[in-house]
Image (cartoon, rainbow, N blue to C red):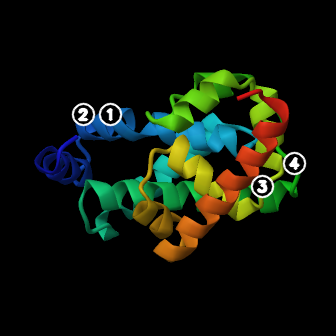
Amino acid sequence: MNAEEFEGVLRAARIGDEWAWTRLYGEFAGRVLGYLRARGAADPEDLLGEVFLQVARNLDGFTGDVVGFRAWLFTVAHRRLIDERRSRGRRPLEPVADLEDVEPSNGPERIVVNRMATAEIVSLLNELTDDQRNVLLLRIVGGLTIDEIGVALSKTRGAVKALQRRGLKKVEKKLRKSVPL
């Protein structure tokens, strides 16, 4: 969705036009759902609904472009996930069969993700810190930029880059042990 289209869709969504909400949902829900699944949400589809409900409630307070909206949407998703975790207690990620349905972004990450089984991905993710895991999932599954991740996680650009670098180093080290390159 380009900037001009987004402005029109956003205006229509603010006045409650159903087609606009359908468009926003269609444009963004897949990646948000992928992030929620990959982070081990108990009921990712339900949580996705809560995310979009909160976005609908707070849409009038949003100012920005499509890039800012995407970052804001993932901020809401991340915070809802934290709320869910607090309410059910923290537990490690478990393999999720639907994770293979998540469409990762293009690039070297896609090659690695496509070669690995879900259990291996979850095992790798469990070895990362929460911050590293969030950064990598938002980058790979969510397709967010470094700046968008910074907004979503309330971190500086430098902190996001460092977390990504350290997380990828851990993943690379583990892969070198288990996958002949």
Label 3 vs 2, first from the N-terminus: 2
Name the element at disc 1: helix
Q: Given this view, does label 3 or label 1 mark the residue nearer the observer?
A: 3
State if disc 2 and disc 1 touch (CB < 8 Å).
yes
* Amino acid type indicated by mark 1: Thr
Q: Mark 1 highlights which residue?
A: 22
Name the element at disc 4: loop
| Mark 3 nearby-residue class (10 Å; few <14, some 14–19, many ≥20) | some
* Amino acid type indicated by mark 4: Pro
Q: Position of residue 8 (x, y in %)?
A: 13, 48
Q: Residue furthest front?
A: 181
Q: Mark 4 highlights which residue?
A: 92
Q: Is residue 159 visible?
A: yes
- Disc 3 to disc 1, C-alpha distance: 35 Å
Label 3 vs 1, first from the N-terminus: 1
- Disc 4 to disc 3, C-alpha distance: 11 Å
Q: Position of residue 156 (x, y in %)?
A: 50, 77
